[in-house]
Each structure stands twice: as structure tokens, then as C-alpha cells.
Image: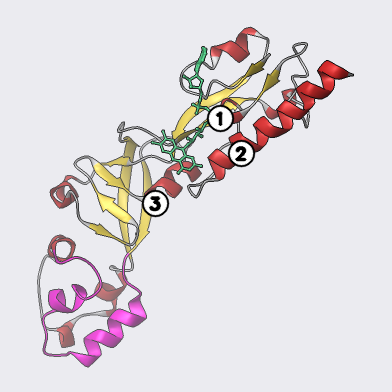
Amino acid sequence: MSIATGLKTYPKLAENYGHTIEEIKPALCGLKIKEKEFLTLRGVSFNNVIFTDVGVSGPYIFKLSSINAYKKYPYEIKIPLINPESLKEKLNDNPKKQFKTVVSCFIPNSLANILIKKDKQAANVSKKEIEELEFLTLTVTGPDNKGEIVHSGGVNLDEIDKNFKSKIAKNLWIIGEVLNIDGFTGGFNLQNCWSDAAICAQDIVKTLYS
Ligand SMILES: Cc1cc2nc3c(=O)[nH]c(=O)nc-3n(C[C@H](O)[C@H](O)[C@H](O)COP(=O)(O)OP(=O)(O)OC[C@H]3O[C@@H](n4cnc5c(N)ncnc54)[C@H](O)[C@@H]3O)c2cc1C
């Protein structure tokens, strides 16, 4: 028999056969944030990030959610905003323009409006003000509960052999997301499931006919 049930629906099946389930956590998901002022930006996107009604999502955030899957909430994330050298150059080239106008060449206008509280002429912008716009720092309070793409955790990999056969239960193979394997976006999770299945199927046939 093989267990290929995915992770969220029925991890208990493998547990019933004596396997250990490493703690299951959402990964590749949007994140809820503490800073309420950014929630007015719902739908605005920049640098592979999109603001939502509860926080942030998009490919860059998915990656951070995966890396931090086991981190305790709340935690801080830093999203790259504007390269300080590029901003400095643009401000120097346009000394009479307003700070917000120059910053809006790099990030959405609505985001610039929140980040720059007091507008001023480009010539008067300090080094500190430039550096403060290098990253957007946000406090993550949890996953956004809008549906994660994969989960971290699952059946302990030490408990299966290289053909995905259980070392604990007889004639049992375990494959796919139910295992403690998860990758970034880009098809790695699907490829993992397909490759596991191919190797497992060959091993089942070998076992049946040997
Ligand atoms: C919205 C979304 C987008 C995604 N996009 C990508 C992507 O772009 N690239 C990528 O690599 N990965 C992506 N993934 C992740 C990828 O789809 C999963 O990692 C992969 O499908 C897991 O395959 P699996 O066969 O292990 O489990 P699943 O595809 O979850 O299949 C498990 C099957 O087992 C069945 N089942 C569960 N419990 C039982 C039971 N007790 N008895 C009988 N049957 C049962 C379920 O009904 C289901 O049909 C995405 C996932 C989601 C949700």
C-alpha cells in the first residue's frame, strides 16, 4: 500500500502505521501584519509583493513564509524597497522636485504617501531619510488563512528508505507532500510528488515480482 494523501487532509494515516509526523505548519502563504496603515493598500503591488486586506502576499512573501514557517509569531520581515544609491542619484538629478515625487519613480505612489510623512524638496533630504527607504519592515502576526500552497512538516524522512518504502511498517510506501519535504514555488513541490511516485511505483513492481 502507499500513502499519498497530501499533508493537510489526513496525516494521521501514516501515524496509525507507527510513523512520526514532524510538526505541520503552513508554508508558501500570505502573511498577516500588525501595521494597519498598510491595509489601505490592498491590491497594490511592488517587487513581487502584493498588499492584501490583512497583510502581504505574492512570490517574495511566499518565500519568506516558507523560510520562517517554524518561527514564533510575531516576527519581523524586511522587504527590499529602494536601493539607496539609486535614490540618492535620482534626488541629486532632481533637486527641485518633491521627495515623494522622486520616491514614486521607484515604488507605488500610494506606498510613498504612507512612508513619507513630511514632504520636502529633494535637495533637503538627509542620508538617514534615504537609508530608511531601503527596506520596508513589517511585523508578521500569523499566516493570512487564505490557503497555503504547501505545508512544512510531515512524515519523518529517517523513517523511509531511498525508494520511499517505510522502515517501520511492512509493504508500505509513503510519497508526496505527506512527507517532511517542501520547496519554494517554481514547481519543486509538484516535481517532488511526481518523482517520488515514479520511484515508489518501480519499487512496488520490483517487490511484487521478486
Ligand atoms: C492553490 C495551490 C497551488 C499550488 N501551486 C503549486 C505550484 O505552482 N507548483 C508546485 O510545485 N506546487 C504547487 N502546489 C503544491 C502541490 O500542488 C502539492 O504539493 C502537491 O499537489 C501534493 O501532491 P500529493 O499527491 O502529495 O497530494 P495531493 O495533491 O494533496 O493529493 C492527495 C490526494 O489524496 C486524497 N486523500 C486525502 N486523504 C485521503 C484518504 N484518507 N483516503 C483517500 N484519499 C485521500 C485527496 O483527496 C487528494 O486527491 C500548489 C498547491 C495549491 C493548494
Horizontal relation, residue 122 to residue 199: left or right: left
**Residue type highlighted by circle 1:** Glu
Q: Are marks 1 and 2 in contact (CB under 8 Å)?
A: yes
Marks 3, 2: nearer the viewer: 2
Q: Which residue is mark 1?
A: 177
The image shows residue 45, relative to residue 98, as above or below, that is above
Mark 1 C-beta to ligand 1 under 8 Å = yes
Comparing 155 with 190, the one in front is 190
**Residue type highlighted by circle 2:** Asn
Total numbered badges shown on the rendered structure: 3
Specify the quadrant of the image occupied by residue 148.
Answer: top left
The image shows residue 79, relative to residue 180, as above or below, that is below
Horizontal relation, residue 104 to residue 48: left or right: left
Binning the other alpha carbons within 10 Å of mark 2 as few (below 14), some (14 to 19) or many (20 upward) gives some
Q: Is residue 136 magenta?
A: no
Q: Residue at x 55, y 12 (%)?
A: 12
For marks 1 and 2, give the CA distance.
8 Å
The outermost residue toward the top is: 16
The outermost residue toward the front is: 209
Q: Is residue 103 magenta?
A: yes
Residue 172 placed where, x, y %? 72, 15
User: Of helix, strand and loop, which one carries label 2?
Assistant: helix
Q: Earlier in the sequence, mark 3 or mark 1?
A: 3
Q: Quadrant of the C terminus?
A: top right
For marks 3 and 1, give the CA distance.
20 Å
Q: Which mark is residue 59?
A: 3
Mark 2 C-beta to ligand 1 under 8 Å = yes
Q: Quadrant of the N terminus?
A: top right
Q: Which mark is residue 192?
A: 2
Residue 15 placed where, x, y %? 61, 12
Specify the quadrant of the image occupied by residue 26.
Answer: top left
**Where does the magenta region start and end?**
81-109
